[in-house]
Amino acid sequence: MGNRLLKKMGRNIAIAGLLGGVTFLAPPVQAEKMDDVLKLKQTRICFRCDLKRADLENASLAGAFLRKSNLKGANLEGADLRFAFIRNVNLKKANLTNADLTGAILRDVNLDGAILTGARLPLNYGGRPNPSQEFRMPDPKKQLPQFPKRSF
């Protein structure tokens, strides 16, 4: 009876070791769906996308349309999100360090635990202006075409 128990324990230990070794050698599971990441980068449109822990560092997403998407824990450090439409998006614990959200429309966005160090948020985000936020008027010489002066 004792030998049978030892054999069974030895077999269970061997199976556990084998499974542990296979798990160790397996590539890490990617958190985000790469199709959604590629779609966002190419079209700047993402509806119901799963972008959990996606690496979007320095991504050019100006004017993007993000709706009902999950970007929990995503890295958006230095991302260009100017004039983006962001609605019903989960940005919980996302890294938005130095991200530019100037002119973006943020509605029903979860920013709990998000890192906003150096981020440029829309001027009236949250219904009140941020006095420490840097705001510069656009240079009209760079924005508008110059017409020749007329003499009358």
Image: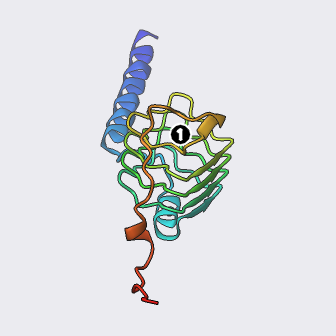
Residue under the point 44% across and 15% down: 5
- Report the residue marked by disc 1: 72
Closer to the camera, 7 or 18?
Answer: 18
Q: Residue furthest top?
A: 2
Q: Secondary structure at mark 1?
A: loop
- Say left or right for 113 vs 117: right
Across and down, in percent, residue 43 comes to 52, 70
Closer to the camera, 66 or 137?
Answer: 137
Q: Quadrant of residue 58?
A: bottom left
Closer to the camera, 132 or 81?
Answer: 132
Closer to the camera, 140 or 15?
Answer: 140
In the displayed structure, would residue 27 be above or below residue 64? Answer: above
Across and down, in percent, residue 131 comes to 49, 31
Across and down, in percent, residue 42 comes to 47, 70
Q: Quadrant of residue 16?
A: top left
Residue under the point 38% across and 69% down: 141
The colouring scheme, among rainbow, by chain, secondary structure or one colour, is rainbow
In the displayed structure, would residue 141 be above or below residue 68? Answer: below
Badge 1 density bin: few <14, some 14–19, many ≥20, Cα 10 Å: many
In the displayed structure, would residue 137 be above or below residue 41? Answer: above
Q: Residue furthest front?
A: 152
Residue under the point 32% across and 36% down: 21
Q: Quadrant of residue 150?
A: bottom left
Residue under the point 39% across and 33% down: 117
Three-letter amino acid code of the residue under disc 1: Lys
Across and down, in percent, residue 85 comes to 61, 56
